[in-house]
Image: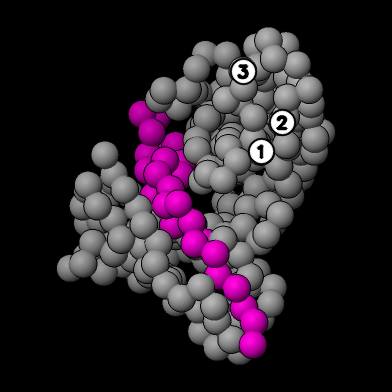
Amino acid sequence: DIVMTQSPLSLPVTPGEAASISCRSSQSLLHSNGYNYLDWYLQRPGQSPQLLIYLGSNRASGVPDRFSGSGSGTDFSLKISRLEAEDVGIYFCMHSLQVPLTFGQGTKVEIK
Amino acid sequence: QLHLQESGPGLVKPSETLSLTCTVSGGSISSSSYYWGWVRQPPGKGLEWIGTSSYRGSTYYNPSLNSRVTIFVDTSKNQFSLKVTSVTAADTAVYYCARRGEMAIKDSWVFDYWGQGILVTVSS
């Protein structure tokens, strides 16, 4: 199985400031088609997860442009350029390169 | 707007079978463009993919659950179901049903719609 490791696990951020989350995979997520099979999901408190970023760097429909994903191979990151109150929650990375799909442990982002 | 809703017992006894249903509304489950799956989250912990199925019955399961898991798509009811046999306390979790759809880029499958989740507790 591909192991996904996120850091930090907790991230207090002042509103308006930037935030960055790292996700590393135990194997390369770069497919022969040139895409990295790495997605980011946000789980707001008491809610189901929602898709933010797919294939490493593509924002899902309706996701604000303050969210950006980058990276390739085994090292990825999610950046929030200016944190807003509605961004609070747990962020998960997930690979979809092969079965089984696996998630990172989650990074809890909260207001400082 | 697509809506997914989980249903089933919230309490299951150890060694018995956990059975959940996900009812899909606002769209047809009978499309080759989508897969239907289950993800669970133990209390206070992270997410675990359980398995995924197409409406034609092509299934993919997490090997960590061995042969205890079955996902079935019922096109006549626009529902899909999950069965987990021989449950233990480790199977206590919030279970989410979700749709796996392909984005604009070919072969970019994501969980694009989720149910609200249902807590299942395994206890005698």
* Residue A45 shows up from this direction: yes
Q: Residue at x 33, y 65 (%)?
A: B80
Q: Nearer the viewer, mark 1 or mark 3?
A: 3
The quadrant holding residue B2 is top left
Marks 3 and 2, how far apart at CA? 11 Å
Q: Which residue is mark 1?
A: A90
- Say whether mark 2 and mark 3 are on the same chain: yes
Report helix, strand or loop for mark 3.
loop
Evaluate whether residue B85 shows in this view: no
Magenta segment: does it hold B4? no
B7 left or right, relative to A35: left
Q: Which residue occupies the foreground of this view, A43 or A58?
A: A43
Amino acid identity at mark 3? Glu
Find disc 2 in the rendering and name its residue: A109
- Nearest to N terminus: mark 2 or mark 1: 1
Say if mark 2 contacts mark 1, CB within 8 Å: yes
**Labels 3 and 2 touching (C-beta < 8 A):** no
Magenta segment, which residues?
Answer: B95-124
Q: What is the chain letter for disc 2?
A: A
Could you give the CA–CA distance between mark 2 and mark 1, rounded to whole angstroms? 6 Å
Q: Amino acid at mark 1?
A: Ile
Identify the residue shown where x is 66% and y is 61%: B42
Residue B7: give x, y in percent of width and height. Answer: 39, 67
Crowd around label 1: few <14 · some 14–19 · many ≥20 (10 Å): many
Q: Secondary structure at mark 2?
A: strand
Establish if A91 lies above or below A105: above
The verdict on residue B108 being magenta is yes
- Residue visible at 60% across and 41% down? A45
* Residue pointed to by mark 3: A84
Label 1 – label 3 distance at C-alpha: 14 Å
